[in-house]
Amino acid sequence: MPRPTGDRRGAAGEPRGGPLTARTTPAARTSSRTRHRPAGGGRAPGWAMAVGALCVSASAVLLDLAHTTPATASFHRCVLALPALVVLAGAERRREGPPPRGHHGLALAAGVLFAGDMLLWTQAIAEVGAGLSTVLVNVQVVLVPLIAWAIDREPVPGRFLGWLPLLLLGVVLTGGVLERGGATGTDPRRGTVHAVLAAVCYSGFLYLLRRGGHSGHVRQLYTVVVASAAVTSMLAGLAWYGFAVAPGWRVMGWLLAVAVSSQVVGWLLVATASPRLASHVGAVLLLLTPVGAVALGAVVLGERPTALQLAGCALILVSAYRASARGPGADRGARRSGAARRQDAPANAAPGDARAAGTGTTGTPDRHRPPGGDSGPGPPGAGSRRPPGGGPGPRP
Protein backbone atom coordinates (compact mmCIF):
# COMPACT_ATOMS: atom_id res chain seq x y z
CA MET A 1 0.00 0.00 0.00
CA PRO A 2 1.31 3.49 -0.72
CA ARG A 3 2.45 5.30 2.39
CA PRO A 4 0.23 8.31 3.20
CA THR A 5 2.01 11.61 2.74
CA GLY A 6 1.43 15.08 4.10
CA ASP A 7 -1.14 13.98 6.69
CA ARG A 8 0.20 13.51 10.23
CA ARG A 9 -3.17 13.46 11.94
CA GLY A 10 -4.45 10.64 14.07
CA ALA A 11 -7.59 8.60 13.66
CA ALA A 12 -9.68 11.16 15.48
CA GLY A 13 -8.48 13.97 13.23
CA GLU A 14 -6.27 15.49 15.90
CA PRO A 15 -2.55 16.20 15.61
CA ARG A 16 -0.33 13.34 16.65
CA GLY A 17 0.40 13.40 20.38
CA GLY A 18 -3.01 14.85 21.32
CA PRO A 19 -4.59 18.25 20.94
CA LEU A 20 -2.26 20.07 23.32
CA THR A 21 0.98 19.24 21.51
CA ALA A 22 -0.14 21.22 18.47
CA ARG A 23 -0.20 24.43 20.49
CA THR A 24 2.79 26.59 19.61
CA THR A 25 2.05 29.86 21.41
CA PRO A 26 4.52 31.13 24.05
CA ALA A 27 1.89 30.60 26.75
CA ALA A 28 1.47 26.98 25.72
CA ARG A 29 5.23 26.40 25.67
CA THR A 30 5.48 27.88 29.16
CA SER A 31 2.60 25.70 30.31
CA SER A 32 4.28 22.64 28.83
CA ARG A 33 7.48 23.34 30.78
CA THR A 34 5.49 23.93 33.96
CA ARG A 35 3.25 20.89 33.72
CA HIS A 36 6.14 18.46 33.59
CA ARG A 37 7.73 19.81 36.78
CA PRO A 38 6.65 17.89 39.86
CA ALA A 39 4.91 19.88 42.56
CA GLY A 40 7.50 21.29 44.91
CA GLY A 41 10.17 20.62 42.36
CA GLY A 42 11.31 17.39 44.01
CA ARG A 43 14.49 17.75 46.04
CA ALA A 44 16.02 20.59 44.02
CA PRO A 45 14.16 23.55 45.65
CA GLY A 46 15.29 22.54 49.12
CA TRP A 47 18.92 22.41 48.10
CA ALA A 48 18.60 25.68 46.16
CA MET A 49 17.05 27.37 49.20
CA ALA A 50 19.82 26.06 51.47
CA VAL A 51 22.60 27.20 49.13
CA GLY A 52 20.88 30.57 48.71
CA ALA A 53 20.65 31.06 52.49
CA LEU A 54 24.34 30.24 52.93
CA CYS A 55 25.29 32.69 50.13
CA VAL A 56 23.22 35.39 51.83
CA SER A 57 25.01 34.68 55.12
CA ALA A 58 28.25 35.94 53.55
CA SER A 59 26.83 39.46 53.36
CA ALA A 60 27.20 40.03 57.12
CA VAL A 61 30.95 39.39 57.03
CA LEU A 62 31.50 41.29 53.77
CA LEU A 63 29.56 44.32 55.01
CA ASP A 64 31.63 44.31 58.18
CA LEU A 65 34.74 44.49 56.01
CA ALA A 66 33.25 47.31 53.89
CA HIS A 67 32.77 49.73 56.84
CA THR A 68 30.22 52.06 55.26
CA THR A 69 26.79 53.49 56.04
CA PRO A 70 23.65 51.31 55.80
CA ALA A 71 22.16 53.29 52.91
CA THR A 72 25.42 53.34 50.94
CA ALA A 73 25.83 49.59 51.36
CA SER A 74 22.19 48.80 50.51
CA PHE A 75 22.15 51.04 47.42
CA HIS A 76 25.42 49.88 45.89
CA ARG A 77 24.91 46.16 46.58
CA CYS A 78 21.65 46.42 44.59
CA VAL A 79 22.94 48.65 41.78
CA LEU A 80 26.05 46.54 41.23
CA ALA A 81 23.85 43.45 40.88
CA LEU A 82 21.48 44.96 38.31
CA PRO A 83 23.57 44.45 35.12
CA ALA A 84 23.76 40.68 35.63
CA LEU A 85 20.11 40.50 36.67
CA VAL A 86 18.98 42.49 33.63
CA VAL A 87 20.76 40.03 31.34
CA LEU A 88 19.10 37.07 33.09
CA ALA A 89 15.70 38.77 33.04
CA GLY A 90 16.02 39.59 29.33
CA ALA A 91 16.73 35.97 28.47
CA GLU A 92 13.72 34.87 30.50
CA ARG A 93 11.48 37.46 28.83
CA ARG A 94 12.45 36.25 25.36
CA ARG A 95 11.74 32.69 26.41
CA GLU A 96 8.57 33.08 28.49
CA GLY A 97 7.21 36.53 27.73
CA PRO A 98 6.43 39.31 30.25
CA PRO A 99 5.00 38.66 33.73
CA PRO A 100 1.22 38.78 34.25
CA ARG A 101 -0.41 42.14 34.81
CA GLY A 102 -0.34 43.36 38.39
CA HIS A 103 2.75 41.44 39.47
CA HIS A 104 5.07 44.41 39.04
CA GLY A 105 3.24 46.11 41.92
CA LEU A 106 4.03 43.17 44.21
CA ALA A 107 7.67 43.30 43.12
CA LEU A 108 7.91 47.05 43.80
CA ALA A 109 6.40 46.59 47.27
CA ALA A 110 8.77 43.70 47.98
CA GLY A 111 11.71 45.92 47.02
CA VAL A 112 10.62 48.65 49.44
CA LEU A 113 10.34 46.09 52.25
CA PHE A 114 13.71 44.58 51.31
CA ALA A 115 15.36 47.99 51.55
CA GLY A 116 13.64 48.60 54.90
CA ASP A 117 14.97 45.29 56.20
CA MET A 118 18.55 46.03 55.08
CA LEU A 119 18.56 49.58 56.47
CA LEU A 120 16.88 48.84 59.80
CA TRP A 121 18.85 45.69 60.53
CA THR A 122 22.20 47.34 59.77
CA GLN A 123 21.22 50.23 62.06
CA ALA A 124 20.15 47.82 64.81
CA ILE A 125 23.54 46.04 64.79
CA ALA A 126 25.25 49.18 66.10
CA GLU A 127 22.48 50.00 68.58
CA VAL A 128 21.73 46.63 70.17
CA GLY A 129 24.57 44.37 69.04
CA ALA A 130 24.88 41.80 66.28
CA GLY A 131 23.64 38.91 68.42
CA LEU A 132 20.28 40.28 69.54
CA SER A 133 19.59 41.95 66.19
CA THR A 134 20.15 38.60 64.46
CA VAL A 135 17.77 36.88 66.87
CA LEU A 136 15.02 39.47 66.45
CA VAL A 137 15.16 39.64 62.66
CA ASN A 138 14.87 35.84 62.44
CA VAL A 139 11.45 35.98 64.05
CA GLN A 140 10.49 35.62 60.36
CA VAL A 141 10.44 31.86 60.99
CA VAL A 142 7.17 32.53 62.87
CA LEU A 143 5.81 35.47 60.90
CA VAL A 144 6.10 34.14 57.34
CA PRO A 145 4.01 30.97 57.93
CA LEU A 146 1.46 33.05 59.87
CA ILE A 147 1.14 35.54 56.99
CA ALA A 148 0.71 32.67 54.51
CA TRP A 149 -1.94 31.14 56.78
CA ALA A 150 -3.81 34.44 57.25
CA ILE A 151 -3.84 35.46 53.56
CA ASP A 152 -3.57 32.23 51.57
CA ARG A 153 -5.08 29.87 54.17
CA GLU A 154 -2.00 27.68 53.90
CA PRO A 155 -2.06 25.30 56.89
CA VAL A 156 0.81 25.24 59.37
CA PRO A 157 1.77 21.62 60.17
CA GLY A 158 1.79 20.49 63.80
CA ARG A 159 5.30 19.10 63.36
CA PHE A 160 6.58 22.60 62.60
CA LEU A 161 4.79 24.10 65.61
CA GLY A 162 6.19 21.39 67.86
CA TRP A 163 9.80 22.08 66.87
CA LEU A 164 9.41 25.87 66.69
CA PRO A 165 10.48 26.56 70.33
CA LEU A 166 13.73 24.65 69.79
CA LEU A 167 14.33 26.52 66.53
CA LEU A 168 13.96 29.85 68.33
CA LEU A 169 16.18 28.66 71.18
CA GLY A 170 18.83 27.73 68.61
CA VAL A 171 18.66 31.23 67.11
CA VAL A 172 19.01 32.79 70.58
CA LEU A 173 22.06 30.64 71.37
CA THR A 174 23.64 31.30 67.97
CA GLY A 175 23.20 35.06 68.43
CA GLY A 176 25.20 34.91 71.67
CA VAL A 177 22.51 36.76 73.61
CA LEU A 178 22.94 34.51 76.66
CA GLU A 179 26.68 35.17 76.78
CA ARG A 180 28.12 37.76 79.13
CA GLY A 181 27.78 41.11 77.40
CA GLY A 182 25.59 39.56 74.68
CA ALA A 183 23.18 42.52 74.61
CA THR A 184 25.56 45.35 73.76
CA GLY A 185 25.28 48.48 71.67
CA THR A 186 24.94 52.24 71.81
CA ASP A 187 21.15 52.32 72.37
CA PRO A 188 19.58 48.91 73.16
CA ARG A 189 16.02 50.26 73.35
CA ARG A 190 16.06 51.93 69.93
CA GLY A 191 18.03 49.01 68.53
CA THR A 192 15.35 46.56 69.65
CA VAL A 193 12.65 48.65 67.96
CA HIS A 194 14.68 48.84 64.75
CA ALA A 195 15.37 45.09 64.80
CA VAL A 196 11.68 44.27 65.29
CA LEU A 197 10.73 46.58 62.42
CA ALA A 198 13.42 44.92 60.32
CA ALA A 199 11.85 41.53 61.12
CA VAL A 200 8.45 42.79 59.96
CA CYS A 201 9.92 44.15 56.72
CA TYR A 202 11.92 40.95 56.20
CA SER A 203 8.84 38.76 56.68
CA GLY A 204 6.73 40.85 54.31
CA PHE A 205 9.51 40.81 51.72
CA LEU A 206 9.83 37.01 51.93
CA TYR A 207 6.08 36.54 51.60
CA LEU A 208 5.76 38.83 48.57
CA LEU A 209 8.87 37.32 46.95
CA ARG A 210 7.34 33.85 47.29
CA ARG A 211 3.86 34.96 46.24
CA GLY A 212 5.10 36.75 43.12
CA GLY A 213 7.07 33.71 42.01
CA HIS A 214 3.99 31.48 41.86
CA SER A 215 3.26 32.71 38.34
CA GLY A 216 6.80 32.11 37.08
CA HIS A 217 8.89 34.92 35.52
CA VAL A 218 10.99 34.89 38.68
CA ARG A 219 14.06 36.61 37.22
CA GLN A 220 12.11 39.50 35.74
CA LEU A 221 10.18 40.16 38.93
CA TYR A 222 13.25 39.77 41.13
CA THR A 223 15.08 42.35 38.99
CA VAL A 224 12.23 44.78 39.70
CA VAL A 225 12.57 43.97 43.43
CA VAL A 226 16.29 44.82 43.43
CA ALA A 227 15.79 48.04 41.42
CA SER A 228 13.03 49.13 43.80
CA ALA A 229 15.26 48.37 46.80
CA ALA A 230 18.08 50.46 45.28
CA VAL A 231 15.87 53.52 44.79
CA THR A 232 14.37 53.18 48.28
CA SER A 233 17.83 52.85 49.87
CA MET A 234 19.08 55.95 48.07
CA LEU A 235 16.08 58.05 49.15
CA ALA A 236 16.35 56.84 52.75
CA GLY A 237 20.07 57.56 52.75
CA LEU A 238 19.59 61.10 51.50
CA ALA A 239 16.89 61.73 54.12
CA TRP A 240 18.23 59.96 57.25
CA TYR A 241 21.16 57.58 57.05
CA GLY A 242 23.80 59.38 55.01
CA PHE A 243 24.68 58.38 51.49
CA ALA A 244 27.88 58.28 49.43
CA VAL A 245 27.71 57.99 45.66
CA ALA A 246 31.43 57.14 45.41
CA PRO A 247 32.52 55.52 48.70
CA GLY A 248 35.97 54.53 47.39
CA TRP A 249 37.48 51.57 45.57
CA ARG A 250 38.09 49.48 48.68
CA VAL A 251 34.48 49.82 49.82
CA MET A 252 33.17 49.22 46.30
CA GLY A 253 35.20 46.04 46.06
CA TRP A 254 33.58 44.56 49.16
CA LEU A 255 30.12 45.74 48.06
CA LEU A 256 30.67 44.09 44.67
CA ALA A 257 31.37 40.85 46.53
CA VAL A 258 28.10 41.33 48.46
CA ALA A 259 26.23 42.02 45.22
CA VAL A 260 27.48 38.83 43.58
CA SER A 261 27.17 36.47 46.54
CA SER A 262 23.94 37.81 48.01
CA GLN A 263 21.95 39.73 45.39
CA VAL A 264 22.83 37.82 42.21
CA VAL A 265 23.28 34.29 43.60
CA GLY A 266 21.80 34.03 47.08
CA TRP A 267 18.51 35.89 46.88
CA LEU A 268 17.87 34.82 43.29
CA LEU A 269 18.10 31.19 44.44
CA VAL A 270 15.71 31.97 47.28
CA ALA A 271 13.31 33.72 44.89
CA THR A 272 13.38 30.72 42.55
CA ALA A 273 13.01 28.04 45.22
CA SER A 274 10.60 29.58 47.74
CA PRO A 275 7.45 29.43 45.53
CA ARG A 276 8.05 25.67 45.16
CA LEU A 277 8.30 25.05 48.90
CA ALA A 278 5.80 25.35 51.72
CA SER A 279 6.10 28.67 53.54
CA HIS A 280 7.24 27.08 56.81
CA VAL A 281 9.92 25.03 55.02
CA GLY A 282 11.36 28.10 53.32
CA ALA A 283 11.31 30.07 56.58
CA VAL A 284 13.14 27.27 58.40
CA LEU A 285 15.80 26.98 55.70
CA LEU A 286 16.60 30.68 55.93
CA LEU A 287 17.73 30.04 59.51
CA LEU A 288 20.87 28.65 57.90
CA THR A 289 21.84 32.32 57.38
CA PRO A 290 22.98 32.96 61.00
CA VAL A 291 24.64 29.54 61.06
CA GLY A 292 26.63 30.37 57.93
CA ALA A 293 27.49 33.82 59.31
CA VAL A 294 28.98 32.27 62.46
CA ALA A 295 31.06 29.81 60.42
CA LEU A 296 32.26 32.42 57.93
CA GLY A 297 33.05 34.90 60.68
CA ALA A 298 35.31 32.32 62.30
CA VAL A 299 37.14 31.65 59.02
CA VAL A 300 37.43 35.20 57.60
CA LEU A 301 37.34 37.51 60.63
CA GLY A 302 39.06 35.19 63.10
CA GLU A 303 36.03 35.18 65.42
CA ARG A 304 35.83 32.30 67.87
CA PRO A 305 32.26 31.09 68.48
CA THR A 306 31.54 29.99 72.04
CA ALA A 307 30.28 26.58 73.07
CA LEU A 308 26.74 27.95 73.40
CA GLN A 309 26.86 29.41 69.89
CA LEU A 310 28.03 26.11 68.46
CA ALA A 311 25.27 24.34 70.39
CA GLY A 312 22.77 26.81 68.92
CA CYS A 313 23.97 26.09 65.39
CA ALA A 314 23.61 22.35 65.97
CA LEU A 315 20.15 22.87 67.47
CA ILE A 316 19.05 24.89 64.43
CA LEU A 317 20.26 22.20 62.02
CA VAL A 318 18.59 19.32 63.88
CA SER A 319 15.35 21.20 64.58
CA ALA A 320 15.19 22.51 61.00
CA TYR A 321 15.49 18.98 59.64
CA ARG A 322 12.78 17.66 61.94
CA ALA A 323 10.46 20.66 61.51
CA SER A 324 10.55 20.55 57.69
CA ALA A 325 10.33 16.77 57.34
CA ARG A 326 7.32 15.61 55.38
CA GLY A 327 4.36 14.68 57.53
CA PRO A 328 0.81 13.40 56.95
CA GLY A 329 -0.51 16.92 56.21
CA ALA A 330 2.08 17.77 53.58
CA ASP A 331 -0.21 17.24 50.62
CA ARG A 332 -2.92 19.39 52.18
CA GLY A 333 -0.38 22.21 52.54
CA ALA A 334 0.64 21.85 48.91
CA ARG A 335 -2.97 22.03 47.77
CA ARG A 336 -3.55 25.14 49.89
CA SER A 337 -0.42 26.77 48.49
CA GLY A 338 -1.61 25.83 45.01
CA ALA A 339 -4.69 27.99 45.49
CA ALA A 340 -2.47 31.07 45.56
CA ARG A 341 -0.75 29.97 42.35
CA ARG A 342 -4.11 29.56 40.62
CA GLN A 343 -5.08 33.09 41.66
CA ASP A 344 -1.85 34.39 40.10
CA ALA A 345 -2.36 32.59 36.77
CA PRO A 346 -2.72 34.98 33.78
CA ALA A 347 -6.29 35.74 32.85
CA ASN A 348 -5.62 35.09 29.16
CA ALA A 349 -3.85 31.75 29.72
CA ALA A 350 -4.56 28.94 27.31
CA PRO A 351 -6.75 26.03 28.42
CA GLY A 352 -4.85 23.99 30.98
CA ASP A 353 -2.42 26.80 31.89
CA ALA A 354 -4.29 27.80 35.04
CA ARG A 355 -4.14 24.22 36.18
CA ALA A 356 -0.39 24.19 35.53
CA ALA A 357 0.05 27.34 37.57
CA GLY A 358 -1.93 25.80 40.40
CA THR A 359 -0.26 22.45 40.70
CA GLY A 360 3.07 22.64 38.92
CA THR A 361 2.50 19.16 37.51
CA THR A 362 0.23 19.13 34.52
CA GLY A 363 -1.86 21.53 32.54
CA THR A 364 -3.72 18.75 30.72
CA PRO A 365 -7.52 18.86 31.13
CA ASP A 366 -9.04 15.86 32.90
CA ARG A 367 -10.41 14.35 29.72
CA HIS A 368 -6.91 14.24 28.20
CA ARG A 369 -5.05 13.15 31.33
CA PRO A 370 -3.36 9.78 30.88
CA PRO A 371 -4.30 6.91 33.17
CA GLY A 372 -2.47 7.03 36.46
CA GLY A 373 -2.88 10.78 37.13
CA ASP A 374 -0.19 13.42 36.99
CA SER A 375 3.01 12.99 35.11
CA GLY A 376 5.22 14.02 38.03
CA PRO A 377 6.52 11.36 40.40
CA GLY A 378 4.38 10.91 43.50
CA PRO A 379 1.35 12.92 44.62
CA PRO A 380 1.24 16.69 44.05
CA GLY A 381 3.22 18.52 46.70
CA ALA A 382 5.13 15.45 47.81
CA GLY A 383 8.50 17.05 47.05
CA SER A 384 7.73 20.29 48.88
CA ARG A 385 7.86 18.71 52.34
CA ARG A 386 10.55 16.07 51.74
CA PRO A 387 13.97 16.99 53.17
CA PRO A 388 16.51 17.01 50.34
CA GLY A 389 18.85 14.08 50.44
CA GLY A 390 16.59 12.20 52.86
CA GLY A 391 18.83 12.79 55.87
CA PRO A 392 20.29 15.44 58.12
CA GLY A 393 22.92 17.72 56.66
CA PRO A 394 23.70 21.37 56.34
CA ARG A 395 20.04 21.79 55.48
CA PRO A 396 17.08 19.50 56.11
Image: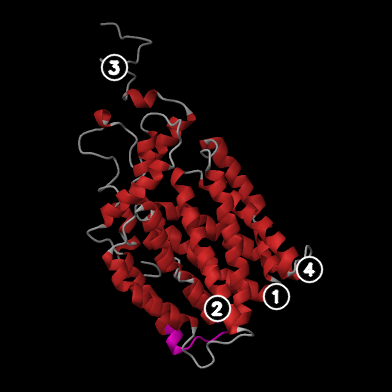
Q: Is residue 304 above or below residue 99?
A: below
Q: Amino acid at mark 4?
A: Gly
Q: Quadrant of residue 328?
A: bottom left
Spatial separation of the CA atoms under disc 2 and disc 3: 69 Å
Q: Nearer the viewer, mark 3 or mark 1?
A: 1
In-front residue for pair 111/387: 111
- Between the residue at mark 4 and the residue at mark 3, the CA separation in whole angstroms equals 68 Å
Query: Compared with residue 258, is residue 173 higher up or lower down, i.e. above or below?
Result: below
Placement of 186 over or under 260, stated as above or below: below
Residue found at x 27% / y 66%:
158
Q: CA distance from mark 1 to mark 2?
A: 22 Å
Q: Residues within 10 Å of mark 1 (few under 14, many from 20)?
A: some
Left of 61 or right of it: where is 19?
A: left
Name the disc covering residue 248, or none: 4
Tell me the crowding category of disc 4: few under 14, some 14 to 19, or many 20 or more residues within 10 angstroms, Cα based: few
Q: Which residue is mark 3?
A: 10
Residue holding disc 1: 67
